[in-house]
């Protein structure tokens, strides 16, 4: 994957919900989801989850990345998880182990990848391009931006 600009988002109707309240602050948690496409083909499903009022505008960006279509299965896709924080210096994305998130157990993904697998392999650039595409293009997460 060369550039986030080559990616586009598909946001299905009714692809957001609120639930809670959060145990630590009492606010409601928001979750939005959609699909990321490249050159006319879906390459990932994504989920962003955050609770308004948490410090540093924290969120989780979860992905199911890989091949999609009629002739594919969960074995063709993997779960990736990223923690987001808006710090004084700006936005920050940190890859975390997908097994620690619900996406790591999603039946659409054949495996959950670890932080080390993402950062030490070809998924590194892809993961940050996916984060950029969502962060810059999904209007539903505008409250996470500085």
Image: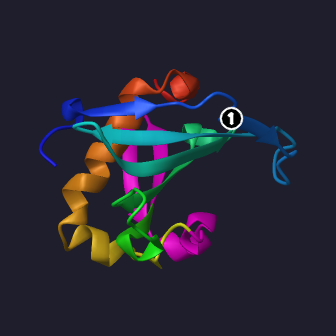
Q: In the drawing, does residue 25 fall left or right of residue 136? A: right
Q: In the drawing, does residue 28 fall left or right of residue 10? A: right
Does the image show residue 84? yes
Could you tell me residue 17's position as x and y percent?
75, 37
What is the residue that sits farthest to the front in this orientation? 70
Q: Is residue 138 above or below residue 113?
A: above
Say how many tags the image has. 1
Does the image show residue 90? no
Q: Tag 1, which secondary structure?
A: strand
Which residue: 82% across, 38% down?
27
Which residue: 16% across, 38% down?
3
Q: Which residues are magenta?
A: 81-107
The foreground one among 29 and 87 is: 29
Which residue: 31% across, 54% down?
127
- Residue 100 located within the stretch drawn in magenta: yes
What is the residue that sits farthest to the left in this orientation? 2
- Residue of label 1: 16
Q: Quadrant of residue 30?
A: top right
Q: In the drawing, does residue 51 fall left or right of residue 135? A: right
Could you tell me residue 103's position as x and y percent?
57, 64
Which residue: 33% across, 40% down?
37
Could you tell me residue 100's position as x and y percent?
57, 73
- Residue 137 located within the stretch drawn in magenta: no
Could you tell me residue 122's position as x and y percent?
18, 66
Q: Is residue 127 above or below residue 2?
A: below
The foreground one among 103 and 51 is: 103
Q: Is residue 107 above or below residue 70?
A: below
């Amino acid at each position: 994957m060369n550039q986030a600009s080559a990616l586009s988002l598909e946001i299905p109707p009714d692809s957001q919900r609120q639930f809670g309240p959060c145990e630590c602050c009492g606010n409601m948690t928001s979750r939005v989801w959609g699909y990321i496409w490249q050159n006319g083909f879906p390459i990932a499903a994504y989920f962003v989850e955050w609770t308004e009022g948490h410090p540093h505008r924290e969120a989780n960006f979860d992905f199911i990345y890989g091949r999609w279509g009629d002739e594919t299965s969960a074995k063709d896709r993997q779960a990736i998880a990223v923690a987001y924080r808006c710090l004084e210096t700006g936005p920050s994305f940190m890859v975390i182990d997908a097994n620690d998130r619900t996406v790591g157990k999603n039946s659409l993904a054949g495996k959950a990848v670890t932080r080390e697998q993402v950062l030490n392999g070809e998924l590194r650039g892809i993961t940050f391009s996916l984060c950029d595409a969502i962060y810059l293009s999904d209007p539903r997460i505008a409250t996470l931006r500085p």
